[in-house]
Image (spheres, rainbow, N blue to C red):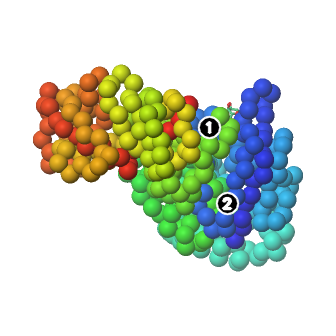
């Protein structure tokens, strides 16, 4: 059980800012994810936590212990990589036992202890019976499990995972997500995960730190980030949405109203920002839009549009509807029959529309 705290951590590579003033506190037993586009500094931050890099500024704490300059092997973290990094000439057993054998003396372990620990780790990842296989005789998912067993066998204080599922096919990836989450919960292990895929981040995490250009722009639970993004960057990065530039018309208490550029429509929405600037952006998620105007409540925006295209996707219909010149992404129930050229009326419920400062 370990709490991890980063205080004002910055890292520069020459003129490149890899991490800038990163402040995060990860609770003991938490599944915490660093999420952001390529190059935003996720891996650098993870490597700083592991001790593979030292920050140029700031401090890293495990509980109350300052580990900023502590060598990686003395931090007792384990890291799992995207490419698994298994030794091809060693069996599954030898791969998993390797770290323990290296530290046998230091940890005061007997051969029997090691055998037992490896057995337990392989049971945890459901690979019992595979001890004598070589990595190349395993599927991608099984190789990933070996990498996980190898990380867990040393009983790390903190588990660090860098896009560990990225090399798996879509179906297996979803299965492994679930397994990883269950395993992490049952071990109550502080886990820090790096990923650029927002769906994966949301499905796994207790909390997520969204990063952009080396900085943490918002930290929150998946729901907080999705429903209450504080910036256009977060709104755009998590989930799909239509985002329109607009001009602030009024703001009072819990809502604001904005006139959409290029359309004579005023839309009401909620905002996390106390005083919005004149130039704002209106964020509309496709799943909040309702077909028809009948059930609109006061403040909702009801618009008429023409279906530009519609795709039946099985569990839903995805459509693009032109409101004047504005294309609006809409998810409709799979029972709805719409096709190109149809005129439709749509309700945009104000409580689900987000108005943010334009970046
Ligand atoms: P990705 O998802 O592509 O792995 P990331 O968010 O993990 O990206 P980092 O790998 O942390 O990003 O890199 C952050 C920035 O620092 C990038 O601009 C990268 O090019 C730069 N960088 C990282 N490591 C080094 C290094 N050893 N030398 C020079 N620049 C580096």
Please name the residue shown 63% across and 68% down the image.
29
Against 253, is 13 above or below? above
Mark 1 Cα-neighbour bin, 10 Å: few <14, some 14–19, many ≥20: many
Residue 359 placement: quadrant:
top right
Report x, y in % for residue 62.
77, 62
Name the foreground residue: 349 vs 174.
349
Q: Could you say which disc has been placed on residue 26 in the image? A: 2
* Residue for badge 1: 212
Say if residue 167 shows up in the picture.
Answer: no
Above or below — where is 110 with respect to 35?
Answer: below
* Image quarter of residue 73: bottom right
Q: Which residue is painted at 32% across and 31% down in the image?
A: 265
Question: Horizontally, is 147 left or right of 257 in the view?
Answer: right
Q: Residue at x 72, y 36 (%)?
A: 18
Q: Is residue 57 left or right of residue 33?
A: right
What mark, if any, has residue 270 been given in the picture? none
Whichever of labels 2 and 1 marks the residue nearer the N terminus, that label is 2
Circle 1 SS class: strand
Q: Residue at x 56, y 50 (%)?
A: 164
Q: Position of residue 9 (x, y in %)?
A: 78, 46
Ligand 1 image-quadrant field: top right
């Amino acid at each position: 059980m370990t709490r991890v705290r980063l205080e004002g951590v910055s890292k520069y590579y020459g003129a490149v800012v890899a991490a800038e003033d990163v402040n995060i506190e990860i609770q003991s037993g938490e599944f915490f994810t660093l999420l952001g586009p390529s190059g935003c500094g996720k891996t650098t931050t993870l490597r700083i936590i592991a001790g593979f890099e030292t920050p140029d500024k700031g401090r890293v704490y495990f509980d109350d212990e300052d580990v900023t300059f502590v060598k990686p092997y003395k931090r007792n973290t384990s890291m799992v990589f995207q490419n698994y990094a298994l030794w091809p000439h060693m069996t599954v057993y030898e791969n998993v036992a390797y770290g323990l054998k290296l530290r046998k003396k230091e940890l005061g372990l007997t051969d029997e202890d090691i055998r037992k620990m490896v057995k337990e780790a392989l049971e945890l990842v459901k690979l019992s019976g595979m001890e004598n296989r070589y990595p190349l005789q395993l599927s991608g998912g099984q190789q990933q499990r070996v990498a996980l067993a190898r990380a867990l066998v040393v009983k790390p204080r903190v588990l660090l995972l860098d896009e560990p599922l990225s090399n798996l096919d879509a179906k297996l990836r979803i299965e492994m997500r679930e397994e990883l989450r269950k395993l992490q919960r049952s071990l109550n292990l502080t886990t820090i995960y790096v990923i650029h895929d927002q769906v994966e981040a949301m499905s796994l995490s207790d909390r997520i730190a969204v990063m952009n250009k080396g900085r943490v722009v918002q930290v929150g639970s998946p729901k907080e980030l999705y429903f209450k993004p504080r910036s256009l960057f977060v709104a755009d990065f998590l989930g799909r949405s239509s985002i329109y530039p607009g001009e602030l018309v009024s703001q009072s208490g819990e809502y604001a109203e904005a006139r959409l550029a290029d359309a004579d429509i005023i839309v009401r929405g909620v905002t996390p920002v106390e005083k919005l600037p004149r130039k704002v952006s209106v964020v509309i998620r496709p799943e909040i839009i309702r077909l028809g105007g009948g059930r609109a409540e006061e403040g909702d925006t009801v618009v008429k549009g023409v279906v530009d295209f519609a795709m039946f996707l099985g569990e839903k219909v995805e459509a693009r509807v032109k409101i004047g010149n504005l294309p609006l992404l809409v998810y409709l129930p799979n029972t709805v029959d719409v096709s190109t050229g149809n005129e439709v009326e749509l309700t945009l419920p104000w409580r689900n529309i987000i108005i943010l400062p334009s970046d």
